[in-house]
Structure formats: C-alpha cells, structure tokens
Image (cartoon, grey):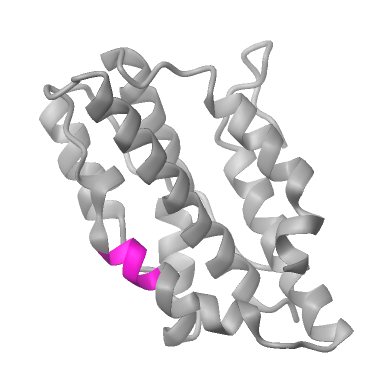
Amino acid sequence: MHLKQETRALHDLLDSRMSKLDLAVAEDYTAFLKIQLAARAPMERWARNDCPPHLRPPEQLPLLIEDLNAIGKPFSLPNRQFSLPSGSNPLGFAWVVAGSHLGNRAMLADLEKRNTSGLPTRFLADPRMIAFWRNLRPQLEQDTNDDTAAKSLEAAIATFRFFFTQLPSEEGQRVA
C-alpha cells in the first residue's frame, strides 16, 4: 500500500515520540489521553462536517472524556481547527486515524499484560474502531491512479502533521 510506504518515516517518528510515555504510569497515561484529545477534537469536528460518511471514523471524544474524567485530572477541549488541504482525498485521513487505533490496541494489550487495571481504557478498547478499520481496508486495497494516490497521501501527511502539533518536542516546545 502506497500510504504505508510513503508515510513510514512520519509513522516511525510518531511512534518513537509517543513511546517516551510509559502508559502504565498514571501521569504519562493522562498526558497520552490529553494529546489524543487535543488532536482528535478538531479532527472530529472537521470530519462531522466535511468528511464523507463512509470515511468518517467513529467519534472518540466521548471515550477520551470518560477516561480523563475517571482519572480525575483537569483537562480542556481544544478550540483549534483541523482541515485537509483543498483537493486532497480524505481516504488518507481515514487511514491514519484507523491505523492509530491499531497502535492503541497494542498499547491496551501491553497495559493488560502489565496488570494496570486501575487505568480507564475505553478509548484504547473501542471496538467500533476495529470495525471501521475492517470496513476501510477494501477501499485502501483498491487500485488507484497516481492522482488519487497522491491526493490520499496529501491527506495522510496533513493528518500526521496535525498529530505532531500536539506533541511536546524534546525541548518542551510543540512540533509543527
């Protein structure tokens, strides 16, 4: 799949940056959930209004909010805006969001193995995202022309970059 190959470096960098958080530690897990909330709230607002229904991921905000409320630490909903570049194909957006849930499932398995039953995991465990991924795969596996592939890639890169804007950099600054 061209999206996976073309975004490998971005995906690896995102994984590397997120792996600095030890999700078995409540403070790090809270930071992870807040990063997700900060990225997904604007993306979900955009998707509700501008993403075709067949490419619109299930909303994760209610689950993130429930998990953060269960932890009991203060948080706020971001007021930032997200949008895809004009003319890009939202299939790339859907692919990034669905793929991130595969990583969430791996994190959930790790937390379960480490016996961290005190942490709320509604967001990580959402079965609707697995169903979304399964429904999305046939669309991802269809042959496409170069123009469609480039437009999907453009959307995927924009989505990855938006996730990066929520991560603290190595020096405590935001990554653009």
Q: Which residue appears at 68% of the width and 79% of the height?
A: 89
Q: Which residue appears at 78% of the width and 67% of the height?
A: 2
Residue stretch in magenta: 128-132
Look at the image and tell me whether residue 70 can be seen. Answer: yes
Residue 68 spot, x, y in % from top left: 21, 33
Q: Which residue appears at 55% of the width and 35% of the height?
A: 166
Q: Which residue appears at 25% of the width and 60% of the height?
A: 127
In the figure, residue 83 lies in which quadrant? bottom right
- Of residues 26 and 12, the one drawn nearer to the viewer in this rendering: 12
- Of residues 147 and 8, the one drawn nearer to the viewer in this rendering: 8
Residue 120 spot, x, y in % from top left: 16, 33
Position of 111 relative to 98 (above/below): above
- Magenta segment, principal secondary structure? helix
Residue 114 highlighted magenta (yes or no): no
Viewport quadrant of the C terminus: top right
Viewport quadrant of the N terminus: bottom right
Position of 114 relative to 167 (above/below): above
In the figure, residue 95 lies in which quadrant? bottom right
